[in-house]
């Protein structure tokens, strides 16, 4: 029975040093963990599970992480920011970051618009999937 993909984050560094990481991934893991970044766990490679954050990949042993419910969006997805009664400026862009908001207990998304990050983070309710057009790709 396939149980992946799953989503979660590492709010702390596990106490047992670096033994929970593939030796080739320690440096990258130290750059990404601990944080509120939402990783996608999808598959296994020997004794390691595979984690993805955008185009970055980590191999880790099963360790304590905080699993969260997937909301339907991934890093790299094209989205439209919805106005929601003028609370947001409508725009279109690509999801750049996915982080856990511990206060609101949901994933927050940062968007790239024309290759520039929008400082505001959005909830899944603020977003709608769109297909990129040639004009958006330029």
Image (tube, rainbow, N blue to C red):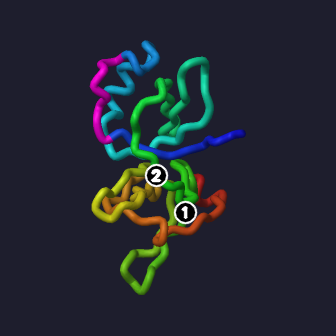
* Identity of the residue drawn at 29% across and 31% down: 13
**Image marks 2 and 1: residues in contact by CB distance under 8 Å:** no
Along the viewing direction, whichever of 71 and 115 lies nearer the viewer = 71
Q: Which residue is mark 2?
A: 68
* Identity of the residue drawn at 36% across and 80% down: 87
How packed is label 1: few (under 14 Cα within 10 Å), some, or many (20 or more)? many
Quick one: which residue is furthest to the right in this view?
Answer: 1
Q: Which image quadrant is residue 44 in? A: top right
Quick one: which residue is furthest to the top in this view?
Answer: 23
Q: CA distance from mark 2 to mark 1?
A: 21 Å
- Expressed as whole percent of the image width and height from the top left, the position of residue 68 reads 46, 52
- Expressed as whole percent of the image width and height from the top left, the position of residue 65 reads 40, 39
In magenta segment, residue 16: yes
Q: Secondary structure at mark 2?
A: strand
The boundaries of the magenta stretch are 11-18
**Quadrant in which the N terminus is drawn:** top right
Quick one: which residue is furthest to the bottom in this view?
Answer: 85
* Identity of the residue drawn at 62% across and 64% down: 130
- Looking at the rendered image, the disc whose residue lies closer to the viewer, 2 or 1, is 2
Along the viewing direction, whichever of 37 and 41 lies nearer the viewer = 41
Q: Which image quadrant is residue 118 in? A: bottom left
- Expressed as whole percent of the image width and height from the top left, the position of residue 49 reads 54, 28
Helix, strand or loop: magenta stretch: loop
């Amino acid at each position: 029975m396939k149980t992946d993909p799953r989503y979660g984050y590492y709010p702390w560094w596990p106490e047992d040093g670096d033994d929970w990481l593939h030796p080739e991934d320690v440096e990258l893991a130290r750059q990404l963990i601990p944080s509120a970044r939402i990783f996608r766990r999808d598959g296994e490679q020997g004794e390691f599970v595979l984690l993805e954050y955008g185009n970055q990949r980590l191999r880790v042993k099963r360790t304590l992480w905080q699993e969260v419910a997937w909301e339907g969006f991934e890093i790299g997805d094209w989205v439209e920011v919805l106005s929601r009664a003028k609370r947001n400026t409508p725009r279109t862009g690509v999801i750049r970051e996915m982080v856990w908001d511990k206060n609101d207990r949901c994933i927050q998304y940062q968007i790239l618009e024309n290759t520039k990050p929008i400082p505001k983070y959005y909830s899944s309710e603020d977003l709608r999937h769109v297909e990129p057009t040639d004009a958006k790709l330029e």
